[in-house]
Image (cartoon, rainbow, N blue to C red):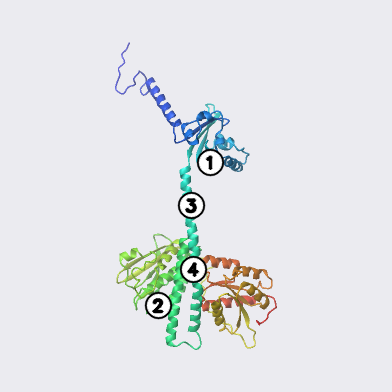
Protein backbone atom coordinates (compact mmCIF):
# COMPACT_ATOMS: atom_id res chain seq x y z
CA UNK A 1 0.00 0.00 0.00
CA UNK A 2 1.34 3.35 -0.90
CA UNK A 3 1.96 5.70 1.95
CA UNK A 4 -0.04 8.86 2.29
CA UNK A 5 1.93 11.82 3.43
CA UNK A 6 0.02 14.36 5.43
CA UNK A 7 1.04 17.93 4.79
CA UNK A 8 0.28 21.00 6.90
CA UNK A 9 -2.96 22.49 5.64
CA UNK A 10 -3.95 19.32 3.70
CA UNK A 11 -7.28 17.55 4.33
CA UNK A 12 -7.35 15.15 7.25
CA UNK A 13 -8.34 12.27 4.88
CA UNK A 14 -7.26 11.65 1.35
CA UNK A 15 -9.19 13.46 -1.31
CA UNK A 16 -9.07 16.23 -3.85
CA UNK A 17 -7.42 19.44 -2.65
CA UNK A 18 -10.03 21.77 -1.04
CA UNK A 19 -12.67 19.02 -0.76
CA UNK A 20 -14.39 19.04 2.72
CA UNK A 21 -13.75 16.02 4.89
CA UNK A 22 -16.43 14.00 6.64
CA UNK A 23 -15.46 15.64 9.94
CA UNK A 24 -15.72 19.07 8.34
CA UNK A 25 -19.17 18.24 7.04
CA UNK A 26 -20.27 17.12 10.49
CA UNK A 27 -18.94 20.32 12.05
CA UNK A 28 -20.71 22.41 9.44
CA UNK A 29 -23.99 20.60 10.06
CA UNK A 30 -23.61 21.00 13.81
CA UNK A 31 -22.84 24.68 13.38
CA UNK A 32 -25.82 25.16 11.09
CA UNK A 33 -28.05 23.34 13.56
CA UNK A 34 -26.78 25.47 16.44
CA UNK A 35 -27.39 28.59 14.37
CA UNK A 36 -30.90 27.43 13.49
CA UNK A 37 -31.67 26.71 17.15
CA UNK A 38 -30.30 30.11 18.16
CA UNK A 39 -32.58 31.77 15.61
CA UNK A 40 -35.64 29.78 16.64
CA UNK A 41 -34.96 30.38 20.32
CA UNK A 42 -34.34 34.12 19.92
CA UNK A 43 -36.41 36.07 22.41
CA UNK A 44 -36.27 39.27 20.35
CA UNK A 45 -38.32 38.06 17.38
CA UNK A 46 -41.54 36.12 17.15
CA UNK A 47 -41.10 33.38 14.55
CA UNK A 48 -44.28 31.60 13.56
CA UNK A 49 -44.53 29.00 10.80
CA UNK A 50 -47.85 27.71 9.48
CA UNK A 51 -49.02 25.05 7.06
CA UNK A 52 -50.54 25.96 3.74
CA UNK A 53 -53.94 26.52 5.41
CA UNK A 54 -52.52 28.96 7.93
CA UNK A 55 -52.55 26.73 11.01
CA UNK A 56 -49.55 27.28 13.29
CA UNK A 57 -46.88 24.55 13.13
CA UNK A 58 -43.95 26.34 14.83
CA UNK A 59 -44.07 28.88 17.64
CA UNK A 60 -40.65 30.00 18.89
CA UNK A 61 -39.49 31.30 22.28
CA UNK A 62 -39.77 34.93 21.12
CA UNK A 63 -43.40 34.39 20.13
CA UNK A 64 -44.09 32.78 23.52
CA UNK A 65 -42.48 35.71 25.33
CA UNK A 66 -44.27 38.38 23.30
CA UNK A 67 -47.75 36.82 23.10
CA UNK A 68 -47.90 34.88 26.38
CA UNK A 69 -48.94 31.55 24.82
CA UNK A 70 -47.01 28.30 25.17
CA UNK A 71 -46.20 26.57 21.88
CA UNK A 72 -48.36 23.51 22.76
CA UNK A 73 -51.36 25.85 23.24
CA UNK A 74 -51.31 27.11 19.65
CA UNK A 75 -49.54 24.54 17.44
CA UNK A 76 -52.09 22.70 15.27
CA UNK A 77 -54.83 24.71 16.98
CA UNK A 78 -55.03 28.32 15.80
CA UNK A 79 -53.99 30.71 13.03
CA UNK A 80 -51.82 33.84 13.47
CA UNK A 81 -54.80 35.93 12.35
CA UNK A 82 -56.59 34.83 15.55
CA UNK A 83 -53.95 36.75 17.53
CA UNK A 84 -54.42 40.02 15.64
CA UNK A 85 -56.96 42.76 16.28
CA UNK A 86 -59.99 41.49 14.26
CA UNK A 87 -61.01 45.01 13.21
CA UNK A 88 -57.56 45.67 11.78
CA UNK A 89 -57.57 42.32 9.95
CA UNK A 90 -60.98 43.16 8.47
CA UNK A 91 -59.76 46.62 7.44
CA UNK A 92 -56.67 45.08 5.81
CA UNK A 93 -58.87 42.65 3.85
CA UNK A 94 -61.02 45.51 2.56
CA UNK A 95 -57.97 47.61 1.63
CA UNK A 96 -56.30 44.73 -0.22
CA UNK A 97 -59.54 43.95 -2.02
CA UNK A 98 -59.63 47.51 -3.36
CA UNK A 99 -55.88 47.57 -4.11
CA UNK A 100 -55.75 44.24 -5.95
CA UNK A 101 -59.30 44.41 -7.36
CA UNK A 102 -60.24 40.98 -6.05
CA UNK A 103 -62.33 39.88 -3.05
CA UNK A 104 -60.16 38.89 -0.07
CA UNK A 105 -61.77 37.38 3.03
CA UNK A 106 -60.92 38.64 6.53
CA UNK A 107 -58.74 36.16 8.41
CA UNK A 108 -55.48 34.49 7.48
CA UNK A 109 -56.11 35.10 3.76
CA UNK A 110 -55.82 38.84 4.43
CA UNK A 111 -52.39 38.27 5.99
CA UNK A 112 -51.01 35.80 3.45
CA UNK A 113 -52.60 36.82 0.14
CA UNK A 114 -49.67 38.87 -1.18
CA UNK A 115 -47.04 36.39 0.01
CA UNK A 116 -48.93 33.54 -1.69
CA UNK A 117 -48.59 35.48 -4.99
CA UNK A 118 -44.85 35.98 -4.51
CA UNK A 119 -45.27 39.64 -3.50
CA UNK A 120 -43.00 40.88 -0.72
CA UNK A 121 -45.20 41.87 2.21
CA UNK A 122 -44.44 43.61 5.49
CA UNK A 123 -47.46 44.87 7.41
CA UNK A 124 -48.21 46.64 10.68
CA UNK A 125 -50.99 45.21 12.84
CA UNK A 126 -51.77 44.93 16.52
CA UNK A 127 -51.03 41.62 18.29
CA UNK A 128 -53.47 40.56 21.05
CA UNK A 129 -51.75 38.65 23.87
CA UNK A 130 -53.16 35.76 25.90
CA UNK A 131 -53.82 38.04 28.89
CA UNK A 132 -55.76 40.53 26.71
CA UNK A 133 -52.99 43.09 26.50
CA UNK A 134 -51.85 44.26 23.08
CA UNK A 135 -48.90 45.80 21.30
CA UNK A 136 -48.21 47.12 17.79
CA UNK A 137 -46.08 44.78 15.67
CA UNK A 138 -44.30 44.82 12.34
CA UNK A 139 -44.63 41.41 10.63
CA UNK A 140 -42.82 40.11 7.57
CA UNK A 141 -44.57 37.18 5.91
CA UNK A 142 -43.03 34.83 3.34
CA UNK A 143 -44.47 31.85 1.48
CA UNK A 144 -42.64 28.50 2.01
CA UNK A 145 -42.36 26.11 -0.94
CA UNK A 146 -40.90 22.62 -1.42
CA UNK A 147 -38.33 21.55 -4.00
CA UNK A 148 -41.10 21.25 -6.59
CA UNK A 149 -42.36 24.79 -6.01
CA UNK A 150 -45.53 23.71 -4.25
CA UNK A 151 -46.78 25.88 -1.38
CA UNK A 152 -46.29 24.14 1.95
CA UNK A 153 -46.77 26.99 4.44
CA UNK A 154 -45.88 30.48 5.58
CA UNK A 155 -43.21 32.03 7.80
CA UNK A 156 -44.11 35.10 9.86
CA UNK A 157 -41.33 37.04 11.62
CA UNK A 158 -42.57 39.78 13.93
CA UNK A 159 -41.05 42.50 16.11
CA UNK A 160 -42.55 44.61 18.86
CA UNK A 161 -43.13 48.11 17.45
CA UNK A 162 -44.17 49.71 20.73
CA UNK A 163 -41.04 51.83 21.17
CA UNK A 164 -41.19 53.31 17.67
CA UNK A 165 -44.93 53.91 17.96
CA UNK A 166 -44.35 55.59 21.31
CA UNK A 167 -41.70 57.86 19.80
CA UNK A 168 -44.02 58.63 16.86
CA UNK A 169 -46.83 59.44 19.26
CA UNK A 170 -44.60 61.75 21.29
CA UNK A 171 -43.35 63.38 18.10
CA UNK A 172 -46.90 63.87 16.80
CA UNK A 173 -47.97 65.29 20.15
CA UNK A 174 -44.99 67.64 20.09
CA UNK A 175 -45.83 68.72 16.52
CA UNK A 176 -49.48 69.25 17.48
CA UNK A 177 -48.44 71.27 20.52
CA UNK A 178 -46.07 73.36 18.40
CA UNK A 179 -48.78 73.96 15.80
CA UNK A 180 -51.26 74.95 18.50
CA UNK A 181 -48.67 77.30 19.99
CA UNK A 182 -48.02 78.78 16.55
CA UNK A 183 -51.73 79.24 15.95
CA UNK A 184 -52.16 80.81 19.36
CA UNK A 185 -49.20 83.12 18.74
CA UNK A 186 -50.49 84.09 15.29
CA UNK A 187 -53.99 84.70 16.64
CA UNK A 188 -52.56 86.77 19.49
CA UNK A 189 -50.41 88.84 17.15
CA UNK A 190 -53.38 89.34 14.81
CA UNK A 191 -55.58 90.40 17.71
CA UNK A 192 -52.86 92.66 19.12
CA UNK A 193 -52.35 94.22 15.69
CA UNK A 194 -56.06 94.95 15.43
CA UNK A 195 -56.29 96.42 18.92
CA UNK A 196 -53.26 98.67 18.35
CA UNK A 197 -54.32 99.80 14.90
CA UNK A 198 -57.74 100.98 16.08
CA UNK A 199 -56.46 103.78 18.38
CA UNK A 200 -53.59 104.50 15.97
CA UNK A 201 -56.18 105.13 13.28
CA UNK A 202 -57.64 107.98 15.30
CA UNK A 203 -54.21 109.37 16.29
CA UNK A 204 -52.73 109.42 12.80
CA UNK A 205 -55.97 110.25 11.03
CA UNK A 206 -56.78 113.35 13.06
CA UNK A 207 -53.12 114.42 13.07
CA UNK A 208 -53.15 114.32 9.24
CA UNK A 209 -56.33 116.39 9.21
CA UNK A 210 -54.90 119.01 11.58
CA UNK A 211 -51.64 119.15 9.61
CA UNK A 212 -53.44 119.92 6.34
CA UNK A 213 -56.36 121.85 7.81
CA UNK A 214 -57.44 125.47 7.48
CA UNK A 215 -56.20 127.69 8.99
CA UNK A 216 -52.73 126.21 8.77
CA UNK A 217 -51.09 125.26 12.07
CA UNK A 218 -48.55 127.63 13.57
CA UNK A 219 -44.88 126.61 13.30
CA UNK A 220 -44.94 125.39 16.91
CA UNK A 221 -48.11 123.39 16.29
CA UNK A 222 -46.63 122.04 13.07
CA UNK A 223 -43.59 120.71 14.95
CA UNK A 224 -45.86 119.07 17.54
CA UNK A 225 -48.02 117.50 14.85
CA UNK A 226 -44.89 116.28 13.09
CA UNK A 227 -43.75 114.56 16.29
CA UNK A 228 -47.17 112.90 16.68
CA UNK A 229 -47.11 111.66 13.10
CA UNK A 230 -43.50 110.51 13.32
CA UNK A 231 -44.16 108.52 16.51
CA UNK A 232 -47.41 107.12 15.14
CA UNK A 233 -45.96 105.94 11.83
CA UNK A 234 -42.98 104.45 13.67
CA UNK A 235 -45.33 102.51 15.97
CA UNK A 236 -47.23 101.29 12.92
CA UNK A 237 -43.95 100.17 11.33
CA UNK A 238 -43.10 98.23 14.50
CA UNK A 239 -46.51 96.52 14.45
CA UNK A 240 -46.06 95.58 10.79
CA UNK A 241 -42.56 94.17 11.34
CA UNK A 242 -43.63 92.03 14.29
CA UNK A 243 -46.61 90.80 12.29
CA UNK A 244 -44.41 89.93 9.30
CA UNK A 245 -41.88 88.09 11.47
CA UNK A 246 -44.63 86.09 13.18
CA UNK A 247 -46.20 85.07 9.87
CA UNK A 248 -42.83 84.04 8.43
CA UNK A 249 -41.92 81.97 11.49
CA UNK A 250 -45.30 80.23 11.47
CA UNK A 251 -44.94 79.38 7.78
CA UNK A 252 -48.18 81.17 6.89
CA UNK A 253 -46.75 83.91 4.71
CA UNK A 254 -47.54 83.18 1.08
CA UNK A 255 -45.48 84.75 -1.69
CA UNK A 256 -46.02 84.86 -5.41
CA UNK A 257 -43.23 84.04 -7.85
CA UNK A 258 -43.55 86.17 -10.97
CA UNK A 259 -41.29 88.13 -13.35
CA UNK A 260 -40.62 91.50 -11.71
CA UNK A 261 -38.98 94.37 -13.60
CA UNK A 262 -35.94 95.64 -11.70
CA UNK A 263 -36.16 98.97 -13.53
CA UNK A 264 -39.72 99.55 -12.33
CA UNK A 265 -39.13 98.35 -8.76
CA UNK A 266 -35.99 100.44 -8.31
CA UNK A 267 -37.77 103.52 -9.70
CA UNK A 268 -40.64 103.04 -7.24
CA UNK A 269 -38.21 102.53 -4.35
CA UNK A 270 -36.25 105.62 -5.32
CA UNK A 271 -39.42 107.74 -5.34
CA UNK A 272 -40.24 106.54 -1.84
CA UNK A 273 -36.83 107.05 -0.18
CA UNK A 274 -35.43 110.13 -1.93
CA UNK A 275 -37.47 112.67 0.11
CA UNK A 276 -36.01 111.28 3.33
CA UNK A 277 -32.51 111.31 1.84
CA UNK A 278 -32.90 114.95 0.80
CA UNK A 279 -34.05 115.92 4.29
CA UNK A 280 -30.79 114.47 5.66
CA UNK A 281 -28.59 115.94 2.95
CA UNK A 282 -27.70 112.52 1.53
CA UNK A 283 -27.24 112.01 -2.20
CA UNK A 284 -28.78 109.06 -4.01
CA UNK A 285 -27.12 107.39 -7.00
CA UNK A 286 -29.02 104.67 -8.88
CA UNK A 287 -27.01 102.95 -11.58
CA UNK A 288 -28.91 102.66 -14.87
CA UNK A 289 -29.44 99.11 -16.12
CA UNK A 290 -27.87 98.51 -19.52
CA UNK A 291 -30.81 96.27 -20.47
CA UNK A 292 -34.22 95.40 -18.96
CA UNK A 293 -33.82 92.76 -16.26
CA UNK A 294 -36.52 90.65 -14.64
CA UNK A 295 -36.19 88.60 -11.48
CA UNK A 296 -38.45 85.88 -10.13
CA UNK A 297 -39.92 87.35 -6.94
CA UNK A 298 -42.98 88.67 -5.13
CA UNK A 299 -43.15 92.28 -6.29
CA UNK A 300 -44.53 93.74 -3.06
CA UNK A 301 -42.08 91.86 -0.85
CA UNK A 302 -39.10 92.65 -3.10
CA UNK A 303 -39.95 96.34 -2.75
CA UNK A 304 -40.19 95.87 1.02
CA UNK A 305 -36.71 94.30 1.05
CA UNK A 306 -35.08 97.03 -1.04
CA UNK A 307 -36.81 99.90 0.77
CA UNK A 308 -35.68 98.52 4.12
CA UNK A 309 -32.06 98.34 2.91
CA UNK A 310 -32.29 101.85 1.42
CA UNK A 311 -33.84 103.37 4.56
CA UNK A 312 -31.11 101.77 6.69
CA UNK A 313 -28.44 103.13 4.35
CA UNK A 314 -29.93 106.62 4.76
CA UNK A 315 -30.62 106.35 8.48
CA UNK A 316 -27.14 105.15 9.46
CA UNK A 317 -25.25 107.39 7.03
CA UNK A 318 -23.43 110.65 7.75
CA UNK A 319 -24.80 114.02 6.77
CA UNK A 320 -23.53 114.93 3.32
CA UNK A 321 -22.88 111.27 2.52
CA UNK A 322 -24.37 109.30 -0.31
CA UNK A 323 -26.08 106.00 -1.10
CA UNK A 324 -25.28 104.09 -4.28
CA UNK A 325 -27.42 101.33 -5.78
CA UNK A 326 -25.76 98.99 -8.28
CA UNK A 327 -26.98 95.95 -10.24
CA UNK A 328 -24.42 93.45 -11.52
CA UNK A 329 -24.69 90.02 -13.08
CA UNK A 330 -22.95 87.21 -11.21
CA UNK A 331 -21.15 84.18 -12.61
CA UNK A 332 -21.55 82.03 -9.51
CA UNK A 333 -24.38 81.22 -9.36
CA UNK A 334 -25.15 81.93 -13.02
CA UNK A 335 -28.30 83.74 -14.25
CA UNK A 336 -28.37 85.80 -11.08
CA UNK A 337 -28.32 89.54 -10.48
CA UNK A 338 -26.83 91.18 -7.40
CA UNK A 339 -28.47 94.38 -6.16
CA UNK A 340 -26.03 96.25 -3.90
CA UNK A 341 -26.86 99.17 -1.60
CA UNK A 342 -23.66 101.02 -0.63
CA UNK A 343 -23.53 103.73 2.06
CA UNK A 344 -20.85 106.05 3.44
CA UNK A 345 -21.73 105.52 7.10
CA UNK A 346 -19.43 104.63 10.01
CA UNK A 347 -19.27 100.98 8.96
CA UNK A 348 -19.36 97.81 11.06
CA UNK A 349 -16.61 95.81 12.75
CA UNK A 350 -16.47 92.01 12.10
CA UNK A 351 -18.16 91.21 15.43
CA UNK A 352 -21.13 93.40 14.45
CA UNK A 353 -21.32 91.86 10.98
CA UNK A 354 -21.58 88.41 12.57
CA UNK A 355 -24.67 89.54 14.53
CA UNK A 356 -26.44 91.34 11.69
CA UNK A 357 -29.47 89.12 11.26
CA UNK A 358 -30.32 88.44 14.90
CA UNK A 359 -33.80 89.53 16.06
CA UNK A 360 -33.91 92.63 18.29
CA UNK A 361 -30.13 93.12 18.03
CA UNK A 362 -29.41 96.74 17.11
CA UNK A 363 -25.62 96.27 17.16
CA UNK A 364 -25.02 98.82 19.88
CA UNK A 365 -27.31 101.49 18.38
CA UNK A 366 -29.84 101.24 21.21
CA UNK A 367 -28.62 104.48 22.78
CA UNK A 368 -28.26 106.30 19.46
CA UNK A 369 -30.51 109.00 18.06
CA UNK A 370 -32.02 106.72 15.40
CA UNK A 371 -35.14 104.73 16.26
CA UNK A 372 -35.23 101.05 15.42
CA UNK A 373 -36.36 97.64 16.58
CA UNK A 374 -33.71 95.25 15.29
CA UNK A 375 -36.44 93.32 13.46
CA UNK A 376 -36.25 94.88 10.00
CA UNK A 377 -33.12 93.10 8.79
CA UNK A 378 -34.36 89.75 10.14
CA UNK A 379 -37.63 90.11 8.22
CA UNK A 380 -35.66 91.23 5.15
CA UNK A 381 -33.37 88.19 5.28
CA UNK A 382 -36.23 85.74 5.66
CA UNK A 383 -38.25 87.33 2.86
CA UNK A 384 -35.23 87.07 0.54
CA UNK A 385 -34.77 83.40 1.42
CA UNK A 386 -38.48 82.69 0.89
CA UNK A 387 -38.15 84.19 -2.60
CA UNK A 388 -35.21 81.87 -3.33
CA UNK A 389 -32.55 84.57 -3.05
CA UNK A 390 -29.51 85.29 -0.92
CA UNK A 391 -28.58 88.31 1.20
CA UNK A 392 -25.28 89.41 2.72
CA UNK A 393 -23.17 92.37 3.72
CA UNK A 394 -19.61 93.62 3.92
CA UNK A 395 -18.28 96.65 5.74
CA UNK A 396 -15.17 98.70 6.41
CA UNK A 397 -15.13 100.78 9.60
CA UNK A 398 -14.85 104.47 8.77
CA UNK A 399 -15.66 103.88 5.10
CA UNK A 400 -19.16 102.40 4.92
CA UNK A 401 -21.14 99.24 4.34
CA UNK A 402 -22.56 97.32 1.39
CA UNK A 403 -25.71 95.25 1.72
CA UNK A 404 -26.53 93.03 -1.24
CA UNK A 405 -29.36 90.82 -2.42
CA UNK A 406 -29.00 88.17 -5.12
CA UNK A 407 -32.09 87.09 -7.07
CA UNK A 408 -32.53 84.63 -9.93
CA UNK A 409 -33.07 86.21 -13.35
CA UNK A 410 -36.07 85.16 -15.39
CA UNK A 411 -37.59 85.89 -18.77
CA UNK A 412 -39.72 88.97 -19.25
CA UNK A 413 -43.50 88.42 -19.20
CA UNK A 414 -45.12 88.24 -22.62
CA UNK A 415 -47.11 91.42 -22.03
CA UNK A 416 -44.21 93.41 -20.57
CA UNK A 417 -44.41 97.07 -21.54
CA UNK A 418 -42.65 100.05 -20.07
CA UNK A 419 -45.53 102.44 -19.56
CA UNK A 420 -45.07 105.82 -18.02
CA UNK A 421 -46.57 106.18 -14.58
CA UNK A 422 -49.95 107.87 -15.14
CA UNK A 423 -50.58 111.16 -13.41
CA UNK A 424 -53.05 111.20 -10.55
CA UNK A 425 -56.51 112.09 -11.86
CA UNK A 426 -57.88 115.36 -10.54
CA UNK A 427 -60.26 115.14 -7.61
CA UNK A 428 -63.85 115.49 -8.81
CA UNK A 429 -65.60 118.56 -7.51
CA UNK A 430 -69.35 118.88 -7.68
CA UNK A 431 -70.71 121.51 -10.06
CA UNK A 432 -73.25 123.97 -8.65
CA UNK A 433 -76.64 122.30 -8.49
CA UNK A 434 -75.21 118.78 -8.86
CA UNK A 435 -76.66 116.40 -6.24
CA UNK A 436 -74.13 114.96 -3.82
CA UNK A 437 -73.11 111.35 -4.23
CA UNK A 438 -73.63 109.35 -1.04
CA UNK A 439 -70.92 107.42 0.81
CA UNK A 440 -72.20 105.01 3.45
CA UNK A 441 -69.72 104.21 6.24
CA UNK A 442 -70.60 101.22 8.47
CA UNK A 443 -68.46 101.63 11.62
CA UNK A 444 -69.16 101.04 15.32
CA UNK A 445 -66.21 103.10 16.63
CA UNK A 446 -67.30 106.75 17.07
CA UNK A 447 -63.74 108.11 16.73
CA UNK A 448 -63.24 106.32 13.42
CA UNK A 449 -66.62 107.53 12.16
CA UNK A 450 -65.82 111.13 13.12
CA UNK A 451 -62.43 110.90 11.43
CA UNK A 452 -63.94 109.79 8.13
CA UNK A 453 -66.64 112.45 8.48
CA UNK A 454 -63.95 115.14 8.66
CA UNK A 455 -62.04 113.63 5.74
CA UNK A 456 -65.15 113.46 3.54
CA UNK A 457 -66.15 117.00 4.59
CA UNK A 458 -63.27 118.19 2.37
CA UNK A 459 -64.93 116.61 -0.65
CA UNK A 460 -67.53 118.85 -2.21
CA UNK A 461 -68.95 115.98 -4.26
CA UNK A 462 -69.68 113.53 -1.43
CA UNK A 463 -72.08 113.30 1.45
CA UNK A 464 -71.48 110.85 4.30
CA UNK A 465 -74.09 108.59 5.85
CA UNK A 466 -73.02 106.66 8.96
CA UNK A 467 -74.32 103.39 10.41
CA UNK A 468 -73.17 101.99 13.75
CA UNK A 469 -73.78 98.31 12.93
CA UNK A 470 -74.19 96.04 9.95
CA UNK A 471 -77.96 95.58 10.27
CA UNK A 472 -78.54 99.32 10.11
CA UNK A 473 -75.96 99.64 7.33
CA UNK A 474 -77.77 97.02 5.23
CA UNK A 475 -81.07 98.86 5.72
CA UNK A 476 -79.50 102.23 4.81
CA UNK A 477 -77.93 100.70 1.70
CA UNK A 478 -81.31 99.41 0.51
CA UNK A 479 -83.12 102.68 1.19
CA UNK A 480 -80.56 105.35 0.21
CA UNK A 481 -78.69 103.48 -2.55
CA UNK A 482 -75.22 104.99 -1.85
CA UNK A 483 -72.67 105.12 -4.66
CA UNK A 484 -69.99 103.56 -2.43
CA UNK A 485 -69.96 101.73 0.92
CA UNK A 486 -67.07 101.73 3.42
CA UNK A 487 -67.36 98.66 5.65
CA UNK A 488 -65.60 97.82 8.90
CA UNK A 489 -65.04 94.07 9.44
CA UNK A 490 -65.30 93.58 13.21
CA UNK A 491 -68.83 94.84 13.77
CA UNK A 492 -71.20 93.92 16.61
CA UNK A 493 -73.70 91.23 15.61
CA UNK A 494 -73.27 90.72 11.89
CA UNK A 495 -69.67 90.97 10.69
CA UNK A 496 -68.62 93.12 7.75
CA UNK A 497 -68.00 90.04 5.59
CA UNK A 498 -71.46 88.64 6.36
CA UNK A 499 -72.99 92.06 5.60
CA UNK A 500 -71.14 92.04 2.27
CA UNK A 501 -72.68 88.66 1.39
CA UNK A 502 -76.18 89.93 2.27
CA UNK A 503 -75.75 93.06 0.14
CA UNK A 504 -74.33 91.06 -2.77
CA UNK A 505 -77.29 88.65 -2.65
CA UNK A 506 -79.83 91.49 -2.85
CA UNK A 507 -80.45 92.72 -6.44
CA UNK A 508 -81.14 96.20 -5.04
CA UNK A 509 -77.62 96.54 -3.60
CA UNK A 510 -75.52 94.01 -5.52
CA UNK A 511 -74.12 96.72 -7.83
CA UNK A 512 -72.68 98.96 -5.07
CA UNK A 513 -68.87 98.77 -4.69
CA UNK A 514 -67.97 98.01 -1.08
CA UNK A 515 -64.54 98.91 0.33
CA UNK A 516 -63.34 97.18 3.49
CA UNK A 517 -61.76 99.55 6.01
CA UNK A 518 -60.43 97.44 8.86
CA UNK A 519 -57.73 97.10 11.49
CA UNK A 520 -57.43 93.42 10.49
CA UNK A 521 -54.15 93.81 8.59
CA UNK A 522 -52.89 90.20 8.50
CA UNK A 523 -52.36 89.16 4.84
CA UNK A 524 -54.71 86.19 5.25
CA UNK A 525 -57.47 88.58 6.45
CA UNK A 526 -56.88 90.87 3.48
CA UNK A 527 -56.94 87.91 1.07
CA UNK A 528 -60.07 86.55 2.72
CA UNK A 529 -61.77 89.93 2.34
CA UNK A 530 -60.85 90.32 -1.33
CA UNK A 531 -61.95 86.75 -2.07
CA UNK A 532 -65.27 87.48 -0.32
CA UNK A 533 -65.91 90.23 -2.90
CA UNK A 534 -64.80 93.57 -1.47
CA UNK A 535 -63.96 96.11 -4.17
CA UNK A 536 -60.85 97.09 -2.20
CA UNK A 537 -59.39 96.42 1.23
CA UNK A 538 -57.82 99.29 3.18
CA UNK A 539 -56.18 98.85 6.55
CA UNK A 540 -56.18 101.20 9.51
CA UNK A 541 -54.60 103.57 10.38
CA UNK A 542 -56.13 105.46 7.46
CA UNK A 543 -53.81 107.13 4.97
CA UNK A 544 -55.89 110.01 3.67
CA UNK A 545 -54.46 110.02 0.13
CA UNK A 546 -54.89 106.25 -0.15
CA UNK A 547 -58.50 106.48 1.00
CA UNK A 548 -59.24 109.24 -1.52
CA UNK A 549 -57.74 107.20 -4.36
CA UNK A 550 -59.79 104.14 -3.37
CA UNK A 551 -63.00 106.21 -3.22
CA UNK A 552 -62.32 107.76 -6.65
CA UNK A 553 -61.75 104.30 -8.17
CA UNK A 554 -64.95 102.99 -6.61
CA UNK A 555 -66.94 106.04 -7.80
CA UNK A 556 -65.66 105.58 -11.35
CA UNK A 557 -66.70 101.93 -11.15
CA UNK A 558 -70.12 102.90 -9.81
CA UNK A 559 -70.67 105.18 -12.83
CA UNK A 560 -70.21 102.21 -15.18
CA UNK A 561 -72.74 99.97 -13.38
CA UNK A 562 -76.45 100.34 -13.67
CA UNK A 563 -78.23 100.08 -10.35
CA UNK A 564 -81.78 100.73 -9.21
CA UNK A 565 -83.14 104.18 -9.90
CA UNK A 566 -84.17 104.65 -6.27
CA UNK A 567 -82.11 107.40 -4.62
CA UNK A 568 -83.03 109.48 -1.60
CA UNK A 569 -81.10 112.08 0.31
CA UNK A 570 -80.44 111.13 3.92
CA UNK A 571 -82.97 112.59 6.29
Image quadrant containing the N terminus: top left
Q: Nearer the viewer, residue 83 or 94?
A: 83
Return the residue at label 1.
Answer: 125
Rounded to the nearest angstrom, the CA distance separating label 4 from label 3 is 28 Å
Numbered disc in front, either 3 or 1: 3
Q: Residue furthest top?
A: 1
Q: Earlier in the sequence, mark 2 or mark 4?
A: 4
Visible residue check, residue 141? yes
Find residue 571 and report its horizontal and vertical position in percent: 66, 82
Which corner quadrant of the image does residue 466 belong to? bottom right
Q: Nearer the viewer, residue 43 or 369?
A: 43
* Residue contact at pointers 3 and 1, CB within 8 angstroms: no
Return the residue at label 3.
Answer: 173
Numbered disc in front, either 2 or 4: 4
Rounded to the nearest angstrom, the CA distance separating label 1 from label 4 is 48 Å
Return the residue at label 4.
Answer: 192
Rounded to the nearest angstrom, the CA distance separating label 2 from label 4 is 33 Å
Which corner quadrant of the image does residue 35 belong to? top left
Q: Earlier in the sequence, mark 2 or mark 1?
A: 1
> Which numbered dot is residue 322?
none
Badge 4 crowding class, 10 Å Cα cut-off, few under 14, some 14 to 19, many 20 or more, is some
Rounded to the nearest angstrom, the CA distance separating label 3 from label 1 is 22 Å
Return the residue at label 2.
Answer: 277
Q: Residue at x 37, y 19 (%)?
A: 15
| Vertical relation: 30 (above or below) 523 | above
Amino acid sequence: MPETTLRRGAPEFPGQPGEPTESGRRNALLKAGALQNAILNSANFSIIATDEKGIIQLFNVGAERMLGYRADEVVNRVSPSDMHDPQEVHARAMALSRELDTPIAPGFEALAFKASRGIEDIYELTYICKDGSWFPAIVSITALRDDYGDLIGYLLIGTDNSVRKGVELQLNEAVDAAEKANRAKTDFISSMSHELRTPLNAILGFAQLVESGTPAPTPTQQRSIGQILKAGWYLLELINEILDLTLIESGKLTLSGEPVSLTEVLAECRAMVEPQAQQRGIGMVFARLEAPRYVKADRTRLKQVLINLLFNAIKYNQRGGHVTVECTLTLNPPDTVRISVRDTGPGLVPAQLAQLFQPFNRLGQESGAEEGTGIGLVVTQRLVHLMGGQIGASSTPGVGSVFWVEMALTAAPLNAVLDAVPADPPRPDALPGTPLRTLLYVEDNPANLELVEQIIARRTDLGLLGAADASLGIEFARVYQPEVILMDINLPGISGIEALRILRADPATAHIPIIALSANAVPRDIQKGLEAGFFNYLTKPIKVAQLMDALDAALRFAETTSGPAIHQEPA
